[in-house]
Structure formats: structure tokens, C-alpha cells
Amino acid sequence: MPDETVIAGIRKNIEAYEAARASAARQVRWRVPLFVGLTLAAVVVIAWLFNKVADPNEQWFSTPHVFLYFIGFAASILLYFQAIKPATRLQQSFRDTLLPIIFGFIREVRYQHGGRPNSFDRLPREAVGPFNRQAFDDVVSGRYEEFPFELYEAELREGTGKGSSTAFKGVIVAFEAVEPFPGILVATRRTNAVVGFFRGLFGSKLQELSSGEPLIDAAYEFRTDNIEAARPLVTGRLAQALKWLGETWPDDPARVALNGGDGFLLLPQAKNFFELPEISVPLDYTRHVAPMISDMGAMLATAALVRKIGVKDEAG
């Protein structure tokens, strides 16, 4: 966790941000009504001119009027986002500066926004289910307690339009396992019998096994392509880790995946872990930054525990 020197540096950066934030907030306050107001005024004037040539029974509602209103509505939305661009740009530039400072307790810390994480292609797809669209937000990587990790916010979706569904939304922590697992092992939230039937019907290469713990087996299903190597983990350290995870992350069961030397901890969450408040809200260290640091510390401490599940008892 950050020491007093780092915290003092964070507070100093917050002071600099606050001066810029107040200026950006003032810009947004006059830009939004100006940009949108001028657009609406132009629509009204043009609609009035259309009335000069429109049928008396179609005043304000002729076909050209309807097209005008549609174009005006679209233009208003576009100009609204143009009006708030100074605030959006400021927030992202501040994140680029502040997040590496906030997470200064992480060695070799690196931050990027929206990039594809390096470890994502090694994540077993069985841990998240089918998806055809992915989006990434904040990506933080570095070394914590001597192990390299990559932590990122991801949203994975299957389908398009209104019929799409969320396969996973939350935080994924990728890390180096202490002991590589000879194959793939995933622990995911237990699905219903129908999903399990179709998975078997279409030939999933992974076999299911149980931990022998009724509560754990009711919440999780374990699947692997190496039953013999997986069994001592599923009945031992992995089951213990999942019990602890259930207490630490009670909202939605965390998922764990091992793929050779790579380990993955998936924490389903709807909220944005690294979100800054709206530009109109003053940034406060205690309310906004300290919880962010605490969340990061908790996730990395959890990953540090999970990465040891493959260690043999006599070595642990």
C-alpha cells in the first residue's frame, strides 16, 4: 500500500487536477446550453421558413419538418458531446497521470486505457463462455509481491443488438502461477442443467469433477482436461480459496482459471473500479482515491492467494 510520501504526492496532483477541473466545469456550463441552444434555435427558424411553403394543414408537421427535427435531434446529441469534450479529455489525461501514482506501491506499474491486454488471448474461454464482442477499459500491470500481473476491466458479450447477452463484465487479474498446471482447469459459477446438456452435446473437451464440499459444489462447477492433476487441487487448495473468495466477493461468485503457467482470477462486477467522479464533483482523496487503492490491494492480495493453489502441501 502507498506510504505517506506517495499519498502526499497524490494529494498534490489532486490539487492540480481540481484547478483544471473547475475551469473545465465552467466551460461545460456555458458550452452545453450554447451549442445545444443554437442548434434548437436554428431548427425552429428553418421550420418556420418551411411553414411558408408547406400546406396549411401540415404546418410544423410536413415531411420536410419531420426530417428537419430528426436531423436537429441528431445534431444536438453530437454537439452535446462536443460541448463536454474538455471535461472528458481532462478526466482521461488525469487518469493517465494519477493512476500510476496511486498504484505506486506496485513495482514497474504500467497503465493504459482501452488497449487489448497481453494475457487475454491465454484466458481459457471456458472460464467466460461464448462471446463475439469484447471491450476493455483500464489496464494496469506490474509486479506485486514479486509476481507479475495484469489487471483489466473487461466486458464480453455474445450476440448483437437487443438480443445480445453479457458473458462477463468485471475485473480480470492475470498472474503467474507458482506451480504451472499441466493443462486447463476452470472453476465457474454452476450453470443450469440445460446449459450443461448442450455443452456436452457439442463436445466440450473438458471433463467435470467435484470438490466433495457440498456448498462449494452447489455454487461452482470444476472442469479440466487433466482430471488426475486437477483432483488434488479441486479437493484441496482451490476449494479453500473459493470459500474465502465467497466471503470476500459475495455479490457474484468469482471465477478461477489455470492454463499452464498462467492463472486468472475473474471478479464479476457492474461498477467501474477506477472511475473518477463527474467533472462537476470535486475530487476527494478519502472518498474517491482511497477506496480505489483499497480495492486494488484487495484484488492483488486475492490473486497472491489464488496463485499458490498448485503448490504441494509439503512445499507450502
Image (cartoon, rainbow, N blue to C red):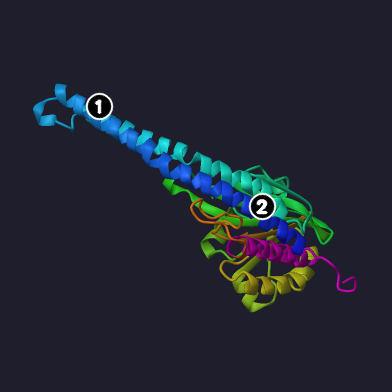
Q: Residue at left 18%, top 33%?
A: 61
Q: Amino acid at mark 2?
A: Asn
Count neighbours of disc 2 (C-alpha within 10 A) and say few if under 14, some if 14 to 19, many if 20 or more: some
Q: Which residues are magenta?
A: 287-316
Q: Amino acid at mark 1?
A: Ile
- Specify the label residue 13 is tagged with: 2
Furthest residue toward left: 56
Asked if residue 285 lies left or right of residue 177, the reply is left
Q: Which secondary structure class fits the magenta region best?
A: helix
Residue 71, x across and y down, in percent: 33, 31
Which residue is found at the position 64% from the left and 66% from the top? 221
Instruction: Determine whether 160 is above or below 67 in the image.
Output: below
Q: Secondary structure at mark 2?
A: helix
Q: Which residue does the image show at 86% across and 69% down from the upper left?
A: 312
Task: Tell me if residue 176 can be seen.
Answer: yes
Q: For the residue labelled by badge 1, is the local secondary structure a helix, a strand or a loop?
A: helix
Q: CA distance from mark 1 to mark 2?
A: 48 Å
Residue 46, label in figure: 1
**Nearest to N terminus: mark 1 or mark 2:** 2
Image coordinates of residue 44 in percent, x first then y, are 24, 32
Q: Is residue 194 magenta?
A: no
Image coordinates of residue 171 in percent, x first then y, are: 63, 57
Residue 310 in the magenta stretch? The answer is yes
Can you tell which of label 1 and label 2 is closer to the viewer?
A: 2
Q: Quadrant of the N terminus?
A: bottom right
